[in-house]
Amino acid sequence: MEGMAAKRKPKLGTGKRFKAVEASARKSGARNPKAVAAAVGRKKYGAKKMAKMAAAGRRRTAKKH
């Protein structure tokens, strides 16, 4: 892995990682890419932490409107 720069991931909780997984799932032909991204997040971070991040995302979205 020498010579390869490690690509930094977006900050956790911003929703950018979720969008990236969603886009990848859509590209792979998933019927419901948001569900795929949510399932991956629950598996990686656990139901409690994923629920906390989802709630923060909903609050952030509600603030915009």
Image: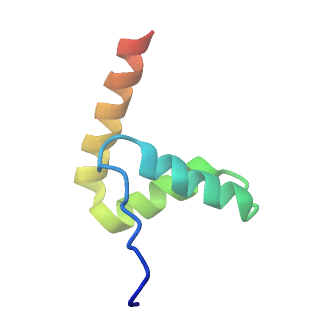
Image spot of residue 4 (x, y percent): 44, 81
User: Which corner quadrant of the image does residue 57 belong to?
Assistant: top left
Q: Is residue 57 above or below residue 33?
A: above
Residue closest to the eye, 18 or 35: 18
Residue 47 appears in the picture as rendered: yes
Quarter containing the C terminus: top left
Residue closest to the eye, 30 or 7: 7
Identified at 66% across, 51% down, the residue is 32
Which colour style is shown? rainbow
In the visual, does 19 lie left or right of 2? Answer: right
Q: Going by the picture, which residue comes out furthest to the top?
A: 65
Image spot of residue 34 (x, y percent): 57, 48
Image spot of residue 47 (x, y percent): 29, 56
Image label count: 0
Image spot of residue 59 (x, y percent): 32, 23
Identified at 23% across, 52% down, the residue is 48
Identified at 36% across, 51% down, the residue is 10
User: Which corner quadrant of the image does residue 31 belong to?
Assistant: bottom right
Quarter containing the N terminus: bottom left
Q: Going by the picture, which residue comes out furthest to the bottom?
A: 1
Residue 30 appears in the picture as rendered: no
Q: Going by the picture, which residue comes out furthest to the front?
A: 3
User: Which corner quadrant of the image does residue 29 belong to?
Assistant: bottom right
In the visual, does 20 lie left or right of 7? Answer: right
Identified at 41% across, 42% down, the residue is 15
In the visual, does 12 lie left or right of 62? Answer: left
